[in-house]
Image: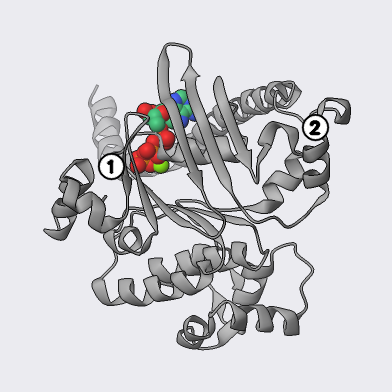
Amino acid sequence: MLALGGAMVTGGAMGLGTLTTFILFSQRVFDPLRQLAERFTQIQGGLTAVERIGELLEQPIEIADLPSSQRSAAAMVSGEERFSPGEVEFENVSFAYRPDDPILTDLSFRIAPGEHVAIVGPTGSGKTTVIRLLCRLYEPQQGTIRLDGVDIRELPIATLRRRLGVVLQDTFLFSGNVADNLRLDADISEADLERLCGDLGLAPLLGRLGDGLATELRERGGNLSSGERQLLAVARVAIRDPSVLVMDEATAFMDPSTEATLQRDLDTLLSGRTAIVIAHRLATVEAADRILVLRRGRLIEEGNHRELRAVGGLYAQLAELQEKGLATL
Ligand SMILES: Nc1ncnc2c1ncn2[C@@H]1O[C@H](COP(=O)(O)OP(=O)(O)OP(=O)(O)O)[C@@H](O)[C@H]1O
Ligand SMILES: [Mg+2]
C-alpha cells in the first residue's frame, strides 16, 4: 500500500510534467485530424457549388439575337454599323423582376444624341434597372426601348453592347500598370493609347499619377483615390468610343477639391457623346443637360437643375439635403 502510495506520489510529482507533455502531444495529434475533418466539409461545400454552377451553365439563354428574317430592314442596316449618333428612347416601359412586384411603371423618355442626362432618385427607385434594360440584360414586360430609332430587340446583342459603354458602381482595377488597365483585351498600340488619352483630356490625371501610363497599380487600384479609380474606369470605356456612355456613379465620399477636378475631367471625357449618369453627387447632376427624377419606378420630375429647384418637388428636397451635407442624392 505504502509502495503503491509511494508510486502514486512519485507518479504525481512526475505527473505534472508528463501530463503537460501528454496534452501538448495529443493536441498535435488531434489538431491535424480536426483540420482534416474541416477541409472535408469545405471540399464537400465546393463540390456542391460546382454542381450548382453546372446547372446554371446548362440553363437556356433567354435573351438571344432575333433571326434576321424577323428583323426590320432599318434594324439590319443599323445592326451592321459600329458607330451611331446615340439616341436613346424608352416608350411606356414597364418591368418587374418578379410578377407581383413592379419595379418600373410606364416609363417614357427620350435622350437626344450628345445630350447628358442624370438619373436621380431614392435608393431602390429603379435607376440601375433602367441601365440593365438598356443593355438588354433583362427584357421589359411592356413597352419598347430604342437605340437610334431601332428597337434594341432587333439589334444584334454584340452591336448593342459595343455601342453602349457602361461604367458600374464598383469599378475593377487589377494590379499591373495603368496602360494595361485601360487597354484590357483591346488591341491598341502604346502610341495610339497615348494619343487617345490626350484626346480624352486625361493628361492632368496621368500627370498626377507620377509615372503616367506606366504607373503600377496595386490590387484593385489600392494606391489611387476613389475619384481617380472612377476616372480610369470611365477612361477605359471611353477609349472604346461607345455611342452612349452609361455610368452608375460610385457613392463613395469625396472631398470637395477632388470633386471639382473629377468633375472637370469627367466633363471632358463625356463631351460630344450621349451620356447617362446615375448620379449621387450634386456636382454631376448640376452639370447635366437634363435630370430625370425617379420615384418607385415612375418618372416624377424632369428638367435641369435650376428648373427642378424652382418646382420645389422631390429633387429640390434631395438637393437641399445634400447641400447641407446630410445625404447623397
Ligand atoms: N435581380 C433582382 N431581382 C429581384 N429584385 C431586384 C433585382 N435587382 C434589383 N431588385 C429590386 O429592384 C428595385 C430597384 O433596384 P435598383 O437596383 O434598380 O435600384 P437603384 O435605384 O439603382 O438603387 P440604388 O440607388 O441603391 O443603387 C429594388 O427594390 C431592388 O430590391
Ligand atoms: Mg443602383
Image spot of residue 250 (x, y percent): 39, 55
Closer-to-camera residue (99/107): 107
Closer-to-camera residue (99/34): 99
Residue at 66 percent of width and 78 percent of height: 196
Q: Quadrant of ligand 2?
A: top left
Residue at 74 percent of width and 21 percent of height: 60
Image spot of residue 229 (x, y percent): 47, 67
- Residue 271 appears in the figure: yes
Q: Position of 157 compared to 293: left or right? A: right
Indicate which disc, 1 or 2, sits on the residue closer to the N terminus.
1
Residue at 46 percent of width and 33 percent of height: 108
Mark closer to the observer (1, 2): 2
Q: Amino acid at mark 1?
A: Leu
Which residue was labeled with disc 2?
72
Residue most extreme to the top: 100
Q: Amino acid at mark 2?
A: Ser
Which residue was labeled with disc 1?
16
- Residue 218 appears in the figure: no
Label 1 to label 2: alpha-carbon separation: 90 Å
Query: Relative to 33, is 186 above or below?
Result: below
Q: Quadrant of the N terminus?
A: top left
Q: Position of 33 compared to 149: left or right? A: left
Which picture quadrant has residue 103?
A: top left
Query: Relative to 33, is 135 above or below?
Result: below
Crowd rating for badge 2 (residues with CA inside 10 Å; few <14, some 14–19, many 20+):
some
Residue at 40 percent of width and 75 percent of height: 264
Image spot of residue 85 (x, y percent): 65, 56
Closer-to-camera residue (211/277): 277
